[in-house]
Amino acid sequence: MIVYGSTLSPYVRKCMVFGAEKGLELQLKFAGPGSPDPEFRAISPFGKMPGFRDGDFTIADSTAIVTYLEAKYPEPNLIPLAAEARARTIWFDELADTIMMAAGSAIFGNRFVKPRVMQLPCDHQAADQAENEQLPPIFAYLETTIPDSFFLVEDRLTLADIAIASPLATLGCIGVCVDAARYPRTAAYVDAIHARPSFAAILARDKAQVEAMGGAVAKATAAA
């Protein structure tokens, strides 16, 4: 099984972590956003990461991919079967894929992708606005939502935790982290999920890649 993309993308990371938690060996084949690679574009016609191949079956979109993996490899169960738990899991997945990614993309895109990958100027105002205005309500919500078990649904690891932790892993690569003084429960939760072997190995490689590209930029440097 092949996942096309880069784990600096939270969507790609979500698929790779999901597979790792199921004990699956997913091969990562690099493909950047909008890549002209015909193999990748045949799978993802709009050039969005990730793409996925399992033999003759191909599909794009991270939620479609993990849904396929869950159906084909149901154990360990990462998308709950009970109606309420499944609904909450999909809610957190959607929260991560839309609201969190809107903020994360503005920050990571402007502070890393544009200047370091695309050689384009950074929109500092958009990045700062996302960090200072869009992220705090998300962290405040999580602070009052995370259970004592430190798992969002059914007191065990599910897609909900993988999805929520993935955008925060990407932001952490450029030094944007949850303020532990302001959101202690959220910060501890994120640290615990990121410490899992499925996340830690990928995150270590992502951080090394960002640092190698000179992307670990302090806010003061980014605003210069």
Image: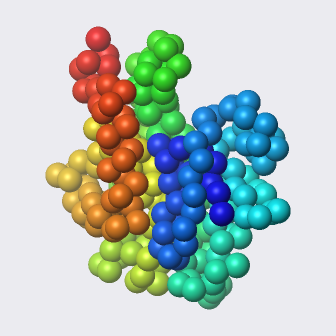
- Which image quadrant for residue 142? bottom left
- Which image quadrant for residue 223? top left
Instruction: Please indicate, yes or no, whether residue 46 appears anywhere in the rendered image.
Output: no
Q: Residue at x 69, y 56 (%)?
A: 52
Residue 106, x across and y down, in percent: 49, 31
Rendered position, 217 above or below 138: above
- Quadrant assignment for the C terminus: top left
Q: Residue at x 42, y 58 (%)?
A: 165
Residue 187, x across and y down, in percent: 26, 57
Depth check: 155 or 139 in front?
A: 155
- Quadrant assignment for the N terminus: bottom right
Rendered position, 78 above or below 96: below
Residue 30, x across and y down, in percent: 58, 42
Q: Which residue is drawn at 63% across and 48% down?
A: 4
Rendered position, 55 above or below 80: above
Residue 82, x across and y down, in percent: 62, 88
Depth check: 119 or 31 in front?
A: 31
Residue placed farthest to the left in the image?
A: 181
Instruction: Please indicate, yes or no, whether residue 194 appears anywhere in the rendered image.
Output: yes
Q: Which residue is drawn at 36% across and 52% down?
A: 203
Q: From the viewer's perspective, is 1 left or right of 124? A: right
Depth check: 172 or 223 in front?
A: 172
